Amino acid sequence: MFARMPSVGLLGVDAKLVHVEVSISSGLPRFEIVGLPGSEVREAKERVRAAIENSGYPFPLRRIVANLTPADWKKEGAGWDLPLALAILGAASVIPVERAARMVAVGELTLDGVVKDVRGMLPAARTAKRIGLPLLCSVDSLDLVRTIEGLQVFPVRSLRQAVEAVQGTCCGATVARESLALDPERREDFADLIEMEHAKRACEIAAAGWHPLLLTGPPGSGKTALGMRITSILPPLSMEEAVEVASIHSTAHLSTNVRPSLHRPFRNPHHSISASGLLGGGSYPRPGEVSLAHRGVLFLDEFPEFSRTAVEGLRQPLESREITVVRNQILVTFPAQILFVAAANLCPCGRSGTDETCHCSPALLQRYYSRMSAPILDRIDLFVEVARLRRSPFERTNGNPESSRIIRARVEAAWKRQKQRQPESVFPFNSGYSLQELRRWAPLTRQARDLLETAYDRLGLSTRAFHRVWRVARTIADLSGHDAVERDDVAEALQYRRRPSAWVDMKDAPGITAASLESNRTGARRLME
């Protein structure tokens, strides 16, 4: 008396195929679940027993062993109730085991046999579609899985309807993809911000090339307002990207019904967040804010107030656009293709850069700045200092500020140019160019090359910073419609490498000698050749 029922389990942001095997043998009545079940799965024994009996089916009073295979990773969640119940009924010869083995079942059961929606249905539906099996799930999940085109679904309300679906007395439906439309325009618009053209230009460059951006300035200067409006100039998600983003949010246990949206995600965690909350982790690894911002914006306001551990953990996702977490011998890789935007004051008290007197001691300033280490700052492409507005907001400005819609059109044109250069790339943006790709796709004019080489000498740029200036210049050229990177593009890119004067400690600046200048000149030539 043996039956097998396919199901899926969440491992990171992916859903893996799991076979629920049930064997009924002679012996004292006992129900055991093996295969590394979590606490919710162990509690499923009583829910399944009551649901089967209250649905009018006899529960086998024999020795029942249920195995969740593969058994080398922990199974969590309440979605195992339905496959367990159907596998038991299959082993008890209530339903045909051959048909049960050709369906994927996911769902929670109440004590009276009602099938409920569970978290993680989108990745479960994607896995069912990938392996070519129909999905048996709650009727409440139908609107969510409707975004998976070509998936055959059996939506049921109760265990009895699920039994009828396996027996073949009710038919499933092949899902026709539901089209998504953009919601009405958000209220935040760059047209609301006056006399901030330099900062808005930097936001446009960051969005066009997917470059990390750091905004600095005194409180009230508009740093947060700029960060909150970045998503308004980003092109919408494609249908596939929207489903991918919604799947990640579904696995994070934010909600049982995470609807896909064409709007780019925007995450703005508080600075008191833990490192695992920001980067992902926990006893059973789940995505953090970095992965929840995948294909969207991660905005860290009051950047120096975040813990040093959390900030240093951003090194990998900013460089590789993914983050690997190891917990309890489980290795999970979360996607982290984020547009990183941060905002910081010039000092802890916030008076630096204003007409007021800053009373921060040198030791306090040193502790404040040390939370943003050189490796982290070196991974940021654009540094912009935002000054307070010197005129009344009620005063008229010359001309009308550009709206987010106008800026977004230029960003879309720049994205199109980048995707035409690398149509098969999963990340075609300029910020991800390797050195070989820079040489191929970002050729420099003679004047641009001389300026970049001189900057490498005078500014003491690291090799990473040198490449980042080159990538930013390529993005500026794309916004201007240039095929090659010109001198003005490099000049504008270099001004965004200037860190705030309050953060520069000349005592820590490297000494510039004739020997070091010649070494830098040689290094710059080799980098560009």
Image (tube, rainbow, N blue to C red):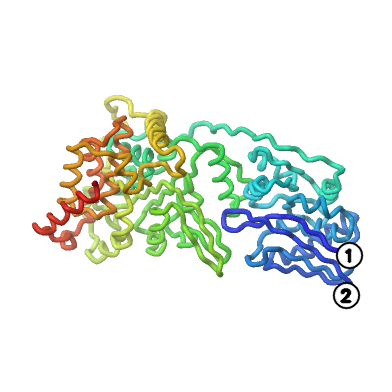
Judge whether residue 2 can be spotted in this image: yes
Q: Earlier in the sequence, mark 2 or mark 1?
A: 2
Residue occupying the point 58% across, 41% down: 260
> Mark 2 touching mark 1, by CB under 8 A?
no
260 sits left or right of 453 in the view: right
Q: Give 100 or 292, whichever is nearer the viewer.
A: 100
Q: Is residue 200 above or below residue 459?
A: above
Residue 429 x %, y %: 39, 42
Residue 449 x %, y %: 20, 41
In this view, which residue lies farthest toward the front?
529
Residue occupying the point 51% across, 65% down: 326
Residue that mark 1 sits on: 60
Secondary structure of the residue carrying tag 1 is: loop
Residue that mark 2 sits on: 28
Q: Residues within 10 Å of mark 1 (few under 14, many from 20)?
A: some
Q: Give 467 or 277, whichever is nearer the viewer.
A: 467
Quarter-wise, where is residue 285 in the image? bottom right
- Residue 280's disc is none
Residue 395 x %, y %: 29, 30
Picture quarter with the N terminus: bottom right
279 sits left or right of 437 in the view: right
Amino acid on which the number 2 mark rests in the picture: Leu
Secondary structure of the residue carrying tag 2 is: loop
Judge whether residue 229 can be spotted in this image: no
Residue occupying the point 48% across, 60% down: 324
Q: Residues within 10 Å of mark 2 (few under 14, many from 20)?
A: few
395 sits left or right of 155 in the view: left
Amino acid on which the number 1 mark rests in the picture: Pro
